[in-house]
Image (tube, rainbow, N blue to C red):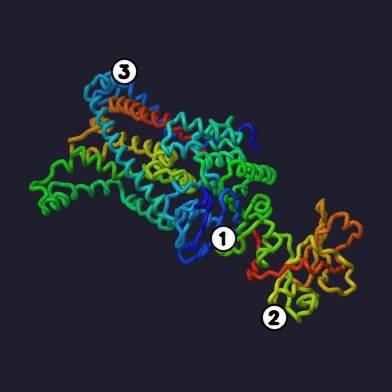
Amino acid sequence: MSAKGEIRIEKISKAFGSLLAVKDVDLSIPAGSYCCMLGPSGCGKTTLLRMIAGHETPTSGRILIGGEDVTDVPTGSRGTALMFQNYALFPHLSVLDNVAFSLKVQGQGTAQRRDQAMNMLKRVQLSHLAERVPAQLSGGQQQRVALARALVTNPQVLLLDEPLSALDEFLRLRMRSELKRLQTELGITFVHVTHTQPEAIALADQVIIMDHGVVEQSGHPREIYDQPHSPYVARFMGGQNVIFGTVGTKGKDGFAVTDEADNKYKLDSALALAKGQKVAFAVRRDGAKLASGKGRSDNAIKGEIRNIEYQGTFVKVALKTCQKDEFLVYLSDGEYFASPRKVGETVSAIWPIERNHYLEGENNSSGDPTGH
Amino acid sequence: MINKDWVPYLQVAPLAILMVLFVAIPLAVLVTLSFWLSDGISLTPTFSFDNYKAVLTSFLTWKLLLATLKFAVLTWFFTLVIGFTCSYFLVFHVKNLKLQIALFLLCTIPFWTSNVIRMISWVPFLGKEGLFNSFLMMLGIIDRPLEFLLFSDFAVVLTYVHLFTLFMMVPIFNSMAKISPSVIEAAVDAGASPFMILKDIIIPLTRTGIALGSVFVVTLVMGDFFVIRVMGGGQSSNIAAAMKNNIDQLYYPDAAAMAVFLIIAVLVPIVVILRIVDVRAELAR
């Protein structure tokens, strides 16, 4: 017996004409969890969400909510509620009637549904605006109305399509914590689509990162941030440097790896690598230190400092190296100001061997959140 | 350099001049004329309420007013149903934008010909020996021609609907096309049936278009004298047609008084429509 609000997606595909938007996706989202689907625009995350909501019919595969096959169940009766990206409030109805609309659909009497809608509005602190129409509200207020409207039917699953993208920075952070608080209070499953990586890791119990219609990696945010599966995931999540090199001989302390500029690295000897193989691995930006560029040491990359940005708690140093991407090092401000650097200086970034994380996935997309 | 104080006046001048030339002056002439007297040959400038007394106390005027309103209501009803349905189909069922534009233009093609041609073309179709009667007789559905098809109220309303449906459809199409698809989806998400979506979402959001279209159709029908003459074949009449009779017999002041009466009769439904729907506020939205 599956718990209420558990979502299982089995071999779901969706084609629009000849374009395959979602390819053979298998997923499981536990009941009562906060799940973020993350990826650049056009990666299929919104299509997947709309299929869970029932606004799109899958070309093949099954969707189960709470253990029940809802693939062919109409939108209004599968226990989900969708919060639209642009809120999609009914422009001709008052805030109260907007929230009460789905109760009206269920056939509740006017007084009863308005009472219930009013309680929901109190919950999102908007009861004082109940008689206004949506055009008279600010973006943040419209957002709350949309949230109240979605929650008023007590859905098992709340689906949110880019809920925070239309808000300014300040409101976004406030709404973000409010969403998390609501989810904890209600204990229902939230599935939240976003292209913003910090939003996903701040909110989610489970992050699903997608690209080109497939799930690249799914797991706890820490796992995805710390142990990305592919160069794409590493770049998209940020916080990592991706390095490409060629495998050399296997020594007792691991495989020797060399890049184009003859920088030397070591990868774990337990990996199944062959000599001459091209490999990619990731190094966390906050895991490396800077050393003056003379000496040659293992597990170091040489480069010229391109940019130095003070960020308050840390200092971000960008190196131009032989690799495609800039190599970024985050140094704590104490550490950096103990030996400040200058732009144009040649230095080495060094880090312990255990910091190397081998990337087994092949996807090498840029991870630019706004598109490909 | 123009004095700054004059600038706003200059800005409203073009519209103001047009309104004065084509609305205010003709209206003033009309109202003045309605107080004059005529003996069928010459006009006597005076200030007399005799014309109004004649118009308002005549049983015929009120009968004609009733007929005029009947045509307006019938035509309004049919153009609304057809115009709304066509717009609904174009906006919500034709997904391809190019096809939508093409179909919309198709609706306007009859307007490449004149009103008269479109109207007259009904005659050979509806007449006693016409296509429709012959067809029905050929199928054996009727054994003698249906008389009511042509030169009847039926023919008049049919022609009005044919001529004026587009005036209803265009404004409705316009306001319907402005409805965001995600608003409809939000209603679907709430579990609303297609009928509820129509009743609670689409119709309320289309009411500006319905109001504007209704104003067009009602004024066009109430002001017509030509269709009713040709298609009514002398069997039907309305206020404008009676006015035309007066003009033909050179009773201009009588016609003018009737015209003023008609203007008021048209203004009443329009004021009612605009009271129900605040067109200005909704257009600004």
Chain containing mark 2 = A
- Which residue is the extreme one toward the left? B143
Could you tell whether A27 is left or right of B93 in the image? right
CB-based contact (under 8 Å), mark 1 and mark 3: no
* Residue bearing the label numbered 3: B49
Chain containing mark 3 = B
| Secondary structure found at label 2 | loop
| Secondary structure found at label 3 | loop
Could you tell whether B147 is left or right of A182 in the image? left
Q: Gap in Å between the C-alphas at discs 2 and 3?
A: 111 Å
Q: Amino acid at mark 2?
A: Ala
Q: What mark, if any, has residue A207 been given in the picture?
A: none
Q: Amino acid at mark 1?
A: Gly
Instruction: Mark yes or no: residue A36 visible.
Output: yes
- Which residue is the extreme one toward the front? A1
Do the residues at pointers 2 and 3 share their chain? no
| Secondary structure found at label 1 | loop
Q: Is residue A317 above or below residue B88?
A: below
- What residue is at 62 percent from the left and 49 percent from the top? A165
Question: Which one is closest to the eye, mark 2 or mark 3?
Answer: 2
Q: What mark, if any, has residue A42 been given in the picture?
A: 1
Where in the figure is residue B241, as x and y percent of width and height? 25, 33
Question: Which one is closest to the eye, mark 2 or mark 1?
Answer: 2
Where in the figure is residue A319, as x and y percent of width and height? 80, 66
Q: Residues within 10 Å of mark 1 (few under 14, many from 20)?
A: some
* Residue bearing the label numbered 2: A274
- What residue is at 61 percent from the left and 64 percent from the top? A216
CB-based contact (under 8 Å), mark 2 and mark 1: no
